[in-house]
């Protein structure tokens, strides 16, 4: 099967067909080019998508990626980034292996096709020239034959005419002979041209044209093979990245399988655990017994002198137990115990011991005095505001619950130790450099690194002092973490009592005639404490300074909120003297403080500390 023998007369059709084949090749190149553009666009969109959902550095989102589910999502984002890279590889390989190669091949194909069809046209022009020569020789032979016939007829006519002279007859005979000779020459030339044309025509249709068409056929077949190979390469380029894409998908599956709901739940506990135990049971308060009036007419309910005084506390606070505390309970936390302090124990009754310590008289306006002190206290509210504004908290993280504080302190210690290690590495490197300079002075001056070494030593010493400071706080926190249920409950109750001093929203209360606190039925509302926008739920006040010591004269069981139990003969610190309500505020240690009846203790005030304390009170007022 050869185009030269089968299509010897289809030169124009072959020319059109080969041009169509080149057009198909260029169309395929355009198709692959658009595919590469799609792959690049898809890869770019995947990368942008992965980048969009990546956690921002030094942000709250970055902290959320410590859970297994979010870490799996982060791994998915990273694998999608690699997945996008494989699509970029597809685009690059298709561009180099298909588009580039086929573009060069098309240019070569066009040149080859042009050369073959040029040879074909040249062969056709040659055979056409031979045909024209044959036609010209044939026409000349035909004309000479006709001229010879006319000359012969004229000679015969002249020869038969008796009136014509012999010279004219001879002239006619010579003319006829000349024409016959010309006809013979034309015949010979025509015969030679015909033979030559037949030979050229045979070579043209059986040699030249078949050879040219055979080359065109081979060219076209190479084009077909090349486009088929390109299509195979098109598939192979995709197939080459399938294993890597499969690994990406396997990694995504592996990350999904690593999600551990139990571990995430435990991490939530570690992240938000305060270290406190839930508060204990609330004691029953028996209001059926007659109670001694503890608040005069000029106390909180009518301290303004115009009848009723309705304190309203504005602001926001976030406490664990405050939303569940009723108004009377809240006001009891804001003040010292509102019941009169119990008389000291005696053999029969308080009146049976005439010379024994007596409970001091209640002075007027104890609640209003405590309320005014609460209103003038600033540190806790200031701390809340600073946290809301995003300000830095205390250096020792005392604004956090014990468990969270311990974690922050441990994290700080680890960071400082890393900094120390970096400084020590630099110091060791400079020390080695100094030794090299000492051994080889031409390499550098050994004294030039002394200044830097001294700076590093100072930095290391500062960092070590910082570590000691934070380790001290850490040891303090670890020592304060609850180890027994009773101790934890005591700490939780104390922490709750301390935190109530920062409550800024309170219901309207009034004093009942019998000295207890009740609320008007028409004004009874629940306290609403809106949540704030920061995470720290606890904020400890700075501890009050010690103004003296005291010795417990009797054993006192502190059963009411805000009181503390003491044993007879126990030495304690005084942090707030009796303000006229019969109660003194004392402290056992950093974790335990509260009120005891003044008549149950013997107070030894430090004059200097007392003066400082009073000065601080005046400044705060």
Image (spheres, rainbow, N blue to C red):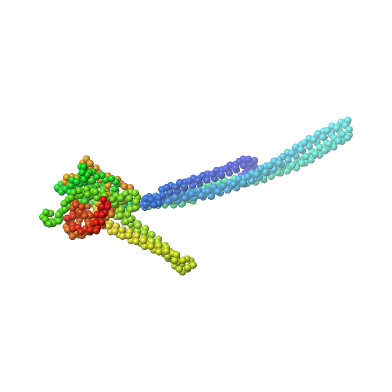
Q: Is residue 210 left or right of residue 391?
A: right
- Does residue 56 appear in this view? yes
Figure check: 510 above or below 358: above
Figure check: 418 above or below 143: below
Observer-nearest residue: 510 or 149?
510
Residue 7 position in % (x across, y down)? 63, 42
Which residue is rendered at x = 31% and y = 47% of the image?
532
Which residue is rendered at x = 32% and y = 54% of the image?
394
Q: Is residue 594 left or right of residue 24?
A: left
Q: In terms of image quadrants, where is residue 353?
A: bottom left
Residue 595 position in % (x across, y down)? 21, 54
Observer-nearest residue: 297 or 608?
608
Query: Extreme bottom residue here?
Result: 439
- Number of marks present in the image shown: 0
Figure check: 236 above or below 568: above
Residue 554 position in % (x across, y down)? 16, 57
Residue 280 position in % (x across, y down)? 23, 52
Figure check: 519 above or below 479: above
Observer-nearest residue: 476 or 355?
355
Quarter that holds the N terminus: top right
Observer-nearest residue: 237 or 519?
519
- Does residue 488 appear in this view? no
């Amino acid at each position: 099967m050869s185009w030269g023998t089968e299509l010897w007369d289809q030169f124009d059709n072959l020319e059109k067909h080969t041009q169509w084949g080149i057009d198909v090749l260029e169309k395929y190149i355009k198709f692959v080019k658009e595919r590469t553009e799609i792959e690049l666009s898809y890869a770019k969109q995947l990368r942008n998508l992965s980048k969009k959902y990546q956690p921002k550095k030094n942000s709250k989102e970055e902290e959320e990626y410590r859970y297994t589910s979010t870490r799996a999502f982060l791994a998915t984002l990273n694998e999608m980034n690699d997945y996008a890279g494989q699509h970029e590889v597809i685009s690059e390989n298709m561009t180099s292996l298909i588009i580039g190669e086929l573009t060069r091949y098309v240019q070569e194909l066009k040149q080859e096709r042009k050369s073959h069809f040029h040879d074909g046209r040249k062969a056709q022009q040659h055979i056409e020239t031979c045909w024209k020569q044959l036609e010209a020789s044939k026409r000349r032979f035909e004309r000479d034959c006709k001229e010879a016939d006319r000359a012969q007829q004229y000679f015969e006519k002249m020869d038969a005419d008796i009136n014509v002279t012999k010279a004219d007859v001879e002239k006619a005979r010579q003319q006829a002979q000349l024409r016959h000779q010309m006809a013979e020459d034309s015949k010979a030339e025509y015969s030679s041209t015909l033979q030559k044309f037949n030979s050229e025509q045979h070579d043209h249709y059986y040699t030249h044209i078949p050879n040219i068409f055979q080359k065109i056929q081979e060219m076209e077949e190479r084009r077909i093979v090349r486009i088929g190979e390109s299509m195979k390469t098109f598939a192979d380029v995709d197939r080459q990245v399938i294993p890597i894409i499969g690994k990406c998908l396997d990694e995504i599956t592996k990350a999904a399988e690593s999600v551990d709901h139990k571990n995430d739940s435990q991490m939530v506990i570690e992240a938000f655990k305060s270290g406190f135990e839930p508060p204990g049971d609330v004691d029953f308060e028996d209001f059926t017994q007659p109670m001694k009036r503890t608040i005069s007419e000029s106390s909180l309910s009518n301290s303004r002198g115009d009848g009723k005084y309705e304190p309203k506390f504005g602001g926001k606070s976030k406490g664990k137990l405050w939303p569940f505390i009723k108004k009377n309970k809240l006001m009891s936390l804001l003040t010292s115990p509102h019941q009169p302090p119990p008389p000291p124990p005696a053999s029969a009754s308080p009146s049976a011991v005439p010379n024994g310590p007596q409970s001091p008289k209640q002075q007027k306006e104890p609640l209003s005095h405590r309320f005014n002190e609460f209103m003038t206290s600033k540190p806790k509210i200031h701390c809340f505001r600073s946290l809301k504004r995003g300000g830095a908290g205390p250096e020792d993280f005392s604004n956090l619950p014990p468990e969270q504080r311990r974690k922050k302190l441990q994290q700080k210690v680890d960071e400082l130790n890393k900094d120390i290690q970096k400084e020590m590495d630099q110091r060791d490197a400079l020390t080695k450099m100094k030794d090299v300079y000492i051994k080889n002075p031409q390499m550098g001056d050994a004294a030039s690194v002394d200044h830097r070494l001294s700076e590093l030593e100072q930095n290391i010493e500062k960092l070590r002092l910082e570590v000691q400071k934070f380790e001290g706080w850490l040891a303090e926190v670890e020592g304060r973490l609850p180890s027994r249920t009773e101790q934890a409950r005591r700490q939780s109750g104390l922490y709750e009592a301390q935190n109530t001093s920062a409550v800024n929203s309170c219901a309207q209360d009034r004093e009942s005639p019998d000295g207890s606190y009740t609320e008007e039925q028409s004004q009874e509302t629940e306290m609403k404490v809106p949540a704030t926008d920061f995470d720290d739920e606890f904020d400890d006040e700075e501890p009050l300074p010690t103004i003296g010591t005291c010795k417990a004269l009797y054993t006192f069981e502190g059963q009411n909120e805000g009181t503390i139990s003491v044993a007879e003969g126990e030495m304690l610190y005084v942090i707030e003297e009796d303000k006229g309500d019969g109660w003194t505020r004392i402290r056992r240690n950093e974790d335990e403080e509260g009120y005891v009846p003044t008549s149950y203790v013997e107070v030894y005030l430090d004059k200097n500390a007392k003066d400082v304390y009073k000065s601080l009170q005046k400044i705060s007022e």
